[in-house]
Image (cartoon, grey):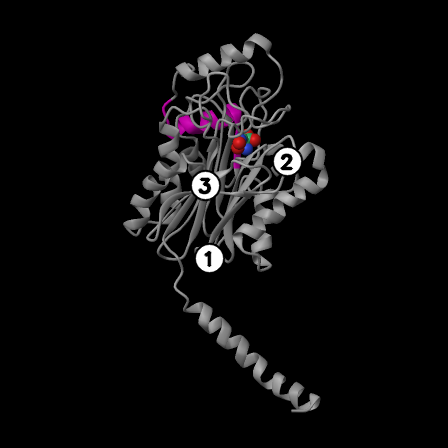
Amino acid sequence: MNRRKFLHFSALTAPLLTATRSFASGFEAANRPIVISTWDSGMPVNAAAWKVLSAKGSALDAVEAGARHMEDRIDCCVGLGGYPDRDGIVTLDSCIMDHQSNCGAVAGIEKIKHPVSVARKVMEKTPHVILVGAGAQQFAVENGFPLESGELSESAKKAYAEWLKKSEYKPVINIENKKQNGPFAPQFFDDGTLNHDTMGLVAMDMNNDLSGAVTTSGMAFKIHGRVGDSPIIGAGLFVDNEVGAATSSGLGEEVIRICGTHLVVEFMRQGYSPELACKKACERIVKRNLEKAKTLQVGFLALNKKGQYGAYAIQKGFVFSVKSEKENQIHQSKYLV
Ligand code: SD4
């Protein structure tokens, strides 16, 4: 075939090949339903979400159920049992997003047990996306959420008392790697408790629809009023039902600076796998300041429309949990530094 004939042949067959490719992928069985969540504490969270998904429930209901499960537990980093800010007050951040880009969030909310459900109410009952602080609490109470006592959990009291001894403003973010040092380094708390960190989860249901949720008490011993990435749509969570969904954990300020999860989803839109998309977002943070990046942790976790998932972190130690028909396990994330 000469060049001219080849070009002619290509012009005729290219649309056919493209059509065949999309036809084939259209019929490729997606790995669904599926739920993936940050950290090993995601295993019981996934189980709670799976109850909904396996009964043909929506991804939205599933991620809310998963996040609520975590908020019910006493954990360093999620819910009212979480570690307080530097004034000794627990403030919670949460958001939720569905397959139609509806989203809701609360930031810095106090004394409310299930911020994720308040976030959902913000999404469904108001024309707004984020409510903060006293206003968020007032809205929660108006919508029937009980006001809790605000007393610290025993573990939080202990950790706070320990922190007060030095009162150094060195907010701890991740705790999976004892050897790291530095202001924003991953480290264990003095009482040796394992930190399971912010809960972010994304799911795809039987209808191929995606949703996600995040819930956290944020960075331990933060300045009162500080808001991290977790309740910020496009930072701690992003869902685009045509492409995929992503969530993050780690030093929120770094995630906000690059609109982290939105970036991950945009990389997936460009054709990158979930893992590579997460890797490229981590690289964006590292590129900005390598020396700083060596002292901090950020991890991204993503799911695409085929039910493929992947994660990447700046440092070693980020793990995530996956539940589908095929598996129920914890995975180690790859890392950059
Ligand atoms: C924050 N991203 O408040 C949250 C905390 C977290 O690992 O995920 N820590 O910045």
> Is residue 291 something that shows in the picture?
yes
Query: Mark 3 or mark 1, which is nearer to you?
Result: 3
Q: Quadrant of ligand 1?
A: top right
Looking at marks 1 and 2 on the same chain, the residue that comes earlier in the sequence is marked by: 2
Q: Which residue is mark 2?
A: 254
Tag 2 secondary structure: helix
Asked whether 136 falls inside the magenta stretch, the response is yes
Asked if labels 2 and 1 touch by Cβ distance under 8 angstroms, the answer is: no
Can you say which quadrant of the picture contains the C terminus?
Answer: top right
The residue carrying mark 2 has its beta carbon less than 8 Å from ligand 1: no
Q: Which residue is mark 1?
A: 305
Mark closer to the chain start, 3 or 1: 1
In the foreground, 69 or 147:
69
- The x and y percentages for residue 28 are 41, 66
Q: Is residue 125 above or below residue 204?
A: above
Contact (Cβ within 8 Å) of mark 3 with mark 1: no
Answer above or below: position of 264 versus 42.
below
State the residue lying farthest toward the front. 179
Neighbours of disc 2 within 10 Å: few (<14), some (14-19), many (20+): many
Mark 1 surroundings: few (<14), some (14-19) or many (≥20) residues within 10 A:
many
- Which mark is in front, 3 or 2? 3
Q: Start and end of the magenta stretch?
A: 130-146
Residue 214 x, y percent position in the rendering: 47, 37
* Rendered image quadrant of residue 269: bottom right
Q: Which residue is mark 3?
A: 320
User: Label 3 is placed on what type of residue?
Assistant: Phe
Q: Secondary structure at mark 3?
A: strand
Q: How many marks?
A: 3
